[in-house]
Amino acid sequence: MNQEQIGQLLDPELINTYLIPWGIRIALALAIFVIGRWIAKVVVRFAERMMGKARLDDMLIAFLGNILYTVLLLVVVIAALDQLGVQTTSLLAVFGAAGLAIGLALKDSLANFSSGVMLIIFRPFKAGDLIEAAGITGIVEEVRIFNTLFRTADNREIIVPNSHIYAGPIVNVSARPTRRIDMVFGIGYEDDIKKARQLIEAAFAADERILKDPAPAVAMAELADSSVNFNVRPWVKSEDYWAVRSDLMERIKLSFDENGISIPYPQQDVYMHNVA
């Protein structure tokens, strides 16, 4: 760069007319953006604290907090652009037209958003519930704007679009304080049915986690091809379901073995005839 070009850059009129005003505008716009974003975070934290004191669901608080932060950040960006001299009125009109086009292009995302709003409003489940939805069984960690985060029993994270959840059946395993364990035990046709029933009822009495009300039930289910089947249906607290189910199956199997009650498996008799 020669001296003439340097002199042009250092021209007082150029500096006073363009460089200093635009430098101030850019600095103010950056300050508005940085400070505005910080204020938005403070406002969101305050709003979440107030909603927490109102004892709203944690999932609802997080969802509303995300929406509030997005709206406030949009306001901050518009204010920063206005400081730079951008015509925000025209810009909003452009955003509106672009929003319509984007909305048509992103209808699936909008469906996920609206489904998320419905899930938050009607609350078929809450954070921490074990549910079955969209072919997934897991604990709900968080309902976000467009998707829901699940944690499976083997500690995997699965993200499911909200529209897939809201459009299908939702089974909330944790909704009720108690659950019924449904099991089927088969004994041989030659075994003592009354004794088998007594052994199952004794297994109920041996486990304090099995509830007395509703009372556990043992009922004849069917005379199957290879066994006489019993429906075994005790009631337990929801959090004890899997532990009691596993322990009860083991206890009944060992009790049957000790008392000569067989648990037959499907079998087929084949007769061979020699043809002369």
Image (cartoon, helix red, strand yellow):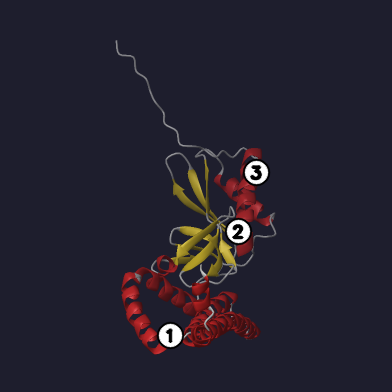
Labels 3 & 2 near each other (Cβ < 8 A): no
Q: Which residue position is annotated with label 3? A: 255
The amino acid type found where label 1 is placed reads Val
For residue 191, what is the image quadrant? top right
**Marks 3 and 1, the one that precedes in the sequence:** 1
Question: What secondary structure is marked by label 3?
Answer: helix
Q: Which residue position is annotated with label 2? A: 241
Q: Position of residue 108 (x, y in %)?
A: 36, 68
- Choose mark 2 or mark 1, whichever is in front: 1
Say left or right for 170 vs 257: left
Q: State the separation of the CA atoms marked 3 and 2.
A: 21 Å
The residue furthest top is 276
**Marks 2 and 1, the one that precedes in the sequence:** 1
Say left or right for 78 vs 107: right
Q: Position of residue 59 (x, y in %)?
A: 56, 74
Q: Which mark is residue 86?
A: 1
